[in-house]
Image (tube, rainbow, N blue to C red):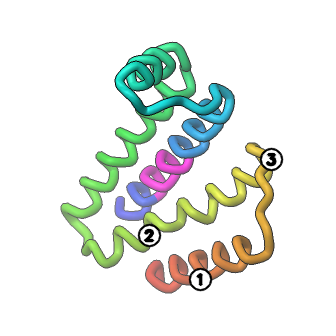
Amino acid sequence: MKWLLVVLMVTATVASDVLQSFEMKRSGEQSVGARGMVRLLRLIAQRRFLILAIGCLAVSFFSFMALVQTEALSFVVPASAASYVFETILARFMLKERVGPRRIAGTLIVLAGVALIGG
């Protein structure tokens, strides 16, 4: 059950972050003032991927909560870092972001850390 929750948490986190990034890049820069906040809330309501991202974020949160009830926080938090690896890969191939050698090296270090705590 532990690993199922980890997979669910990581998958939901990755989906949420990628969907948010995709939609926000599509919508352009938004101001943060009072009027900008109203526009941003309206934008969220109109964008189905943002609504889906919020749902994924909720799944991730509840998976995290379920995990910390039964597992050590020192396991759960590093295990959640696996999302960085998948997000970097998806950013490169789905969002067409440039991922340079330093980011690749950092991602591989994170992957090594996740593998260490998983064993």
Most foreground residue, 46 or 62? 46
Chain-order first, disc 1 or disc 2: 2
Of the numbered discs in the image, which one, if any, rests on residue 103?
none
Report the residue at 79% width, 75% height from top.
101
Q: Is residue 114 above or below residue 52?
A: below
Chain-order first, disc 2 or disc 3: 2
Label 3 sits on residue: 96
Is there CB contact under 8 Å for labels 1 and 2?
no
Query: Which circle, 2 or 3, is nearer the viewer?
Result: 3
Amino acid type of the residue tagged 1 in the rendering: Ala
At numbered mark 2, what does the secondary structure look like: helix, strand or loop? helix
Of the numbered discs in the image, which one, if any, rests on residue 79?
2
Tell me: 63 left or right of 92. Answer: left
Task: Find the magenta span and give its range.
Answer: 7-14
Q: Pinpoint residue 103: horizontal percent, then vertical percent.
A: 70, 71
At numbered mark 1, what does the secondary structure look like: helix, strand or loop? helix
Report the residue at 80% width, 47% height from top.
96
Q: Pinpoint residue 48: horizontal percent, then vertical percent.
A: 54, 20
Counting other residues with Cα less than 10 Å from the Cα at mark 2, is it few (<14), some (14-19), or many (20 or more)? many
Amino acid type of the residue tagged 2 in the rendering: Ala
The secondary structure making up most of the magenta span is helix
Report the residue at 41% width, 41% height from top.
57
Name the quadrant containing residue 28: top right
Q: Pinpoint residue 62: horizontal percent, then vertical percent.
A: 29, 46
Counting other residues with Cα less than 10 Å from the Cα at mark 3, is it few (<14), some (14-19), or many (20 or more)? few
Quadrant of the image containing the N terminus = bottom left
Counting other residues with Cα less than 10 Å from the Cα at mark 1, is it few (<14), some (14-19), or many (20 or more)? few
Label 1 sits on residue: 112
Chain-order first, disc 1 or disc 3: 3
